[in-house]
Amino acid sequence: MVKQYGDLYLDARRTLLAVEEAQQAGNVARQLLSHVSGKSQEQILAQRDLYAPEEVALAMDAALKRLLEGEPLAYVLGQWEFYGLPMRVTRDVLIPRDDTCAVAELAIRQGLFLNQDPRILDLCCGSGCIGLAIASRVKDAKVTLADLSKEALAVAKENTALNKLSGRVRCLQADARKAPVPFLGKFDMIVSNPPYVTGAEMQMLPASVREYEPHMALYGGEDGLDFYRAIAKNFSAALKPGGYLCFEFGMGQGDDVCRILEENGYTVLERTRDYQDMERAVLARYGKEG
């Protein structure tokens, strides 16, 4: 049955009230209808009395079904925003979260004080959200997005093009747990949001994360620290003298991550919190303070 855009919105909002509060149900209904129709939310409001094509109504039903089955909204939409940038997301990459803005901001602040045309590596880049946020703010930075997953790198390449940053951003495959290959060269700063979920935490993840987001990007070993050990040990070889390493970490991991850094010859400069006031990121320089 053909419906008006206004009725499609109201029906979706009514359906979503089973799983969302009223305001959020309305917000999600608008986002879904905008996505499946290809119209802006403003256009939908202006055209609410027009009849939508049948394919739009069918696509709306399919999108609602996915949401009600527990699939995250970002994957249903296929796009999410991070640090003011549009990001394509698929189930091959983690959904960019506000928590990760903490490490992006820390890296950007340091990046603005690096030498001219700094080289910055986003290791375990996933969608590329951190490295692209840095490239968008540090206007002379040359950024490399690196990940072991070829599927994630394909998404990162799409996001590089989407944000018109291909001139200063490249993507390549690299294993964060192994020594960097020589052709990577030397970087002024490495930033990483590596997998850090512990074995015990993997069993307790919300279904929306456990069943939809890539486990490869989540599991950091039994204590969650495997990637920090490997990167701190191996990737100093890819840093210029006095170069910087910037990590995101999980709740309660800050002291352990800082200890790993110090044991591998780094000086911890700053620890910072996310928007929920949880300690979330650290900046360190390779080399001891004299």
Image (cartoon, rainbow, N blue to C red):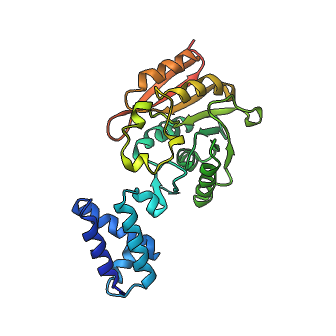
- The percent position of residue 179, horizontal first and vertical second, equals 69, 28
Within the image, what quadrant is residue 185 found in? top right
Residue under the image location 45 percent in, 56 percent down: 81
Is residue 50 placed above or below 266 in the rendered structure? below
Is residue 41 placed above or below 272 in the rendered structure? below
Residue under the image location 47 percent in, 38 percent down: 103
- The percent position of residue 204, horizontal first and vertical second, equals 36, 38
| Image quarter in which the N terminus is found | bottom left
Q: Residue reaching furthest top?
A: 290
Task: Pick the residue in front: 218 or 31.
Answer: 218
Within the image, what quadrant is residue 59 found in? bottom left
Is residue 207 placed above or below 279 in the rendered structure? below
Q: Residue reaching furthest right?
A: 183
Residue 156 visible in the current orientation:
yes
| Image quarter in which the C terminus is found | top right
Task: Pick the residue in front: 263 or 43.
Answer: 263
- The percent position of residue 154, horizontal first and vertical second, equals 63, 54
- The percent position of residue 201, horizontal first and vertical second, equals 39, 34
Q: How many tags in the picture?
A: 0
Residue under the image location 33 percent in, 68 percent down: 29
Is residue 122 placed above or below 59 in the rendered structure? above
Task: Pick the residue in front: 49 or 229.
Answer: 229
